[in-house]
Amino acid sequence: MTTVKIAPMLAKTVTMAVSIAWFTDACARMFPWLIACIPLILLDLRYGVKAARYRHELVRFSKGLRATVGKVFEYLCWISVSVLLAHTFGEEWIEPLVLALVILNEFSSIIGNYFETKGYKWNQTAVWKAIAKKGADAVKLDLETNDLITKKEEEKDNGES
């Protein structure tokens, strides 16, 4: 007659239950961030396509779709990392800090593409330095003096080769 070893089976069951509960909690914390990132992804797609058209680049549906799907997976990875770091270390401030950096970087891309479609060049480094130095409220986007946003020179084609 064989005896059933209950302790290993019980340990596996408890480990699985704790893991599933931990993963379920982590997924529940990720969901609002995923919803919040959808408008960013769509704005990036819109202004990225407009900027490419402004540069007279060939805009292909497959390339835009590929970039957008890649962006979705990048966001999923960043959201997973931030939530799991916060969950692992038990520090709630880690999650919004990591995601704020990612979202600020995305806003930089969107704003840069927007200004490019309007014929301006946005100096991202100068803007962030000015914000860090003076604060967001004190920064004035003076086009001529601060060099934060500059008008692009129109390329003139005189027909010369």
Image: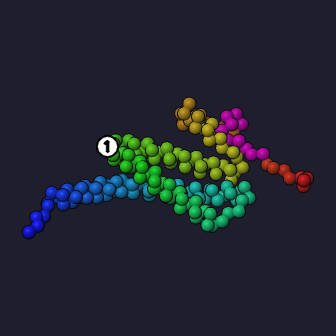
Amino acid on which the number 1 mark rests in the picture: Gly
Q: Residue at x 22, y 58 (%)?
A: 12
Residue range highlighted in magenta: 144-153
Which residue lies most toward the right here? 160
Residue 64: where, in percent of width, then height?
61, 62
Q: Residue at x 53, y 57 (%)?
A: 71
Residue 64 in sight from this viewpoint: yes
Q: Is residue 133 left or right of residue 22?
A: right
Quarter of the rendering occupied by the N terminus = bottom left
Quadrant hosting residue 10: bottom left
Most distant residue in the bottom direction: 1
Q: Position of residue 109 (x, y in %)?
A: 59, 49
List the residue tagged with mark 1. 90
Q: Nearer the viewer, residue 89 or 122?
A: 89
What residue is drawn where x is 54% and y is 46%?
Answer: 105
| Residue 97 location, quadrant | top left
Outermost left residue = 1
| Residue 88 position within the rendered picture, expressed as x and y whole percent measured from the top left | 33, 46
Whether residue 151 sits left or right of residue 29 in the image: it is: right
Q: Residue at x 67, y 55 (%)?
A: 51
Going by the image, does 47 lie left or right of 154?
A: left
Does 150 lie within the magenta span? yes
What x and y, as percent, mark residue 139?
Answer: 59, 35
Q: Main secondary structure of the magenta part?
A: loop
Give the mark count: 1
Helix, strand or loop at label 1? It is: loop
